[in-house]
């Protein structure tokens, strides 16, 4: 076929789609497998959200409310912002794309870390922008000094996920304050807080004060993690009304479906599910860390519901080996960590199963 494709589109690498779990099971001849690979909520969705969405099914013949009015009101009241300071999206992924569409012109630069959440660099490329990539520091944290040094007259945006995926590390509040002081005032800083719910409150950055400061800052959050609604696709950005205005210009009118809006409102008041998730995640992470250490691996400290493990051998081989036991983890060579895997905390039975499978694989592969 004679297609004229722009070079920045031709060179894009498609997101590797994971196979449905049922297909994997068929392929590997296993059953009852567990997935600890995608930083999801192991305890399921908020039951209140599920019940509210069931009731809303009969209205699916109507288009959704393009302003997410009720969801915006609920969230604004809960976190203390004006509803005009919120932009909702089809997952926070969409907000990343909207920011890039609205504020980046082809040939302009965006700074991201390596490794970090893969979508930033991909969406910059889709827009024809230039990715400037700064290595994480030795202790696997965003290197804010090196990021400042990488700023050029063409820099338009900086993406910082806090905590960082895949490392689980966070940005120090004082370091961030200094960084913001030194940064020029026409670069948009995007603080992606997809996992902020899991961070100890005293370690969180006060994003609202930055959003209301003199420099452009947007914070991204999601219902995919602590609220357990990944499949629903609901996320949002908090930002100055002027920035939000541009995102609202470029977004599709009905970008958030009606079930997501109803489910989101209900999830926001489901404190029981939210706190249960955080408590069990914390307990699970602590237990897993100890067990993994006992097996001679090196677990990395985390502020999230997932963590990296240095398995002291080839991570992809270990991943394959564990797959045969029905335990799905994430190999990390694509992120530049060939000897690591990343796992998400699961329910207690899943964590136990993971540790059993890890012990078997480490032994059979002769790692350590
Ligand atoms: C750092 C980070 N940001 C954003 C997202 C996307 O979240 P959402 O499901 O809201 O699109 C993820 C998902 O894994 C993530 O790890």
Image (tube, grey):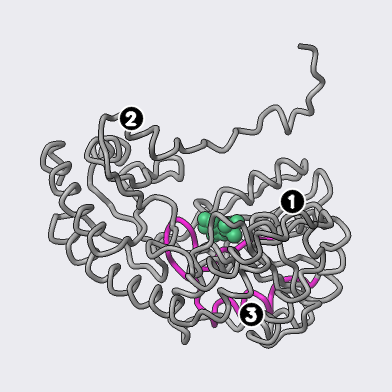
Asked if disc 3 and disc 1 are in contact, CB closer than 8 Å, the reply is no
Residue ID for mark 2: 26
Earlier in the chain: of badge 3 and badge 2, it is 2
In the displayed structure image, the side of residue 205 where residue 10 appears, left or right = right
In the rendered image, the quadrant that contains the N terminus is top right
In this rendering, the label closer to the viewer, 3 or 1: 3
Chain-order first, disc 1 or disc 2: 2
Residue in the image at 28% along x and 38% along y = 323
Find disc 3 in the rendering and name its residue.
207
Q: Residue at x 66, y 29 (%)?
A: 11
Image quarter of residue 272 = bottom left
Q: Front-most of 32 and 297?
A: 32
User: Circle 1 sits on which residue?
Assistant: 109
Magenta stretch contains residue 46: no
State ligand 1's quadrant: bottom right
48 vs 250, nearest the viewer: 48
Whether label 3 touches label 2, CB < 8 Å:
no
Q: Is residue 299 left or right of residue 144?
A: left
Does label 3 or label 1 sit earlier along the sequence? 1
Q: Residue 72: x, y in percent?
A: 73, 76
Q: Is residue 165 magenta?
A: yes
Residue 55 horizontal/vertical position (percent): 62, 66
Helix, strand, or loop for circle 2?
helix
**Residue range corresponding to the magenta coloring:** 158-185
Residue at mark 3 to residue at mark 1: CA–CA distance = 24 Å
Residue 117 lies, in percent from the top left, at: 54, 53
The residue most toward the top is 1
Mark whose residue sits in front, 3 or 2: 2
């Amino acid at each position: 076929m004679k297609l004229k494709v722009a070079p920045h589109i031709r060179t894009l690498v498609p997101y590797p789609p994971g196979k449905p779990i049922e297909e994997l099971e068929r392929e590997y001849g296993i059953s009852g497998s567990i997935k600890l690979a995608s930083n999801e909520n192991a305890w399921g969705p908020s039951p209140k959200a599920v019940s509210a969405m069931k009731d809303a099914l009969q209205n699916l013949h109507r288009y959704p409310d393009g302003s997410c009015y009720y969801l915006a009101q609920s969230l604004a009241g809960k976190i203390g912002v004006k509803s005009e300071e919120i932009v909702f999206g089809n997952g926070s992924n969409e907000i990343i794309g909207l920011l890039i569409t609205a504020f980046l012109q082809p040939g302009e630069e965006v700074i991201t870390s390596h490794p970090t959440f893969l979508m930033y660099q991909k969406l910059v490329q889709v827009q024809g922008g230039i990715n400037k990539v700064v290595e994480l520091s030795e202790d696997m944290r965003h290197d804010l000094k090196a990021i400042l040094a990488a700023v050029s007259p063409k820099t338009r945006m900086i993406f910082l996920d806090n905590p960082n995926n895949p490392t689980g590390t966070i940005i120090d509040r004082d370091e961030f304050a200094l960084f913001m002081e030194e940064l020029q005032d026409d670069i948009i800083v995007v603080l992606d807080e997809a996992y902020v719910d899991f961070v100890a409150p005293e370690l969180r950055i006060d994003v609202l004060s930055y959003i209301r400061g003199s420099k452009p800052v947007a914070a991204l959050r999601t219902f995919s993690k602590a609220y357990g609604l990944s499949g629903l696709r609901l996320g949002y950005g908090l930002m100055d009304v002027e920035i939000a205005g541009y995102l609202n210009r470029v977004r599709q009118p009905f970008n958030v479906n009606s079930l997501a809006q109803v489910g989101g409102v209900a999830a926001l008041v489901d404190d029981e599910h939210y706190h249960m998730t955080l408590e069990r995640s914390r307990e699970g992470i602590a237990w897993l860390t100890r067990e993994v250490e006992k097996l001679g691996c090196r677990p990395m400290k985390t502020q999230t519901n997932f963590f990296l493990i240095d398995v002291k051998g080839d991570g992809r081989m270990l991943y394959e080996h564990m797959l045969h036991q029905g335990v799905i983890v994430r190999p990390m060579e694509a992120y530049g960590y060939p000897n690591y895997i990343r796992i998400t905390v699961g329910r207690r039975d899943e964590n136990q199963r993971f540790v059993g499978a890890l012990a078997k694989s480490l032994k059979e592969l002769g790692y350590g």
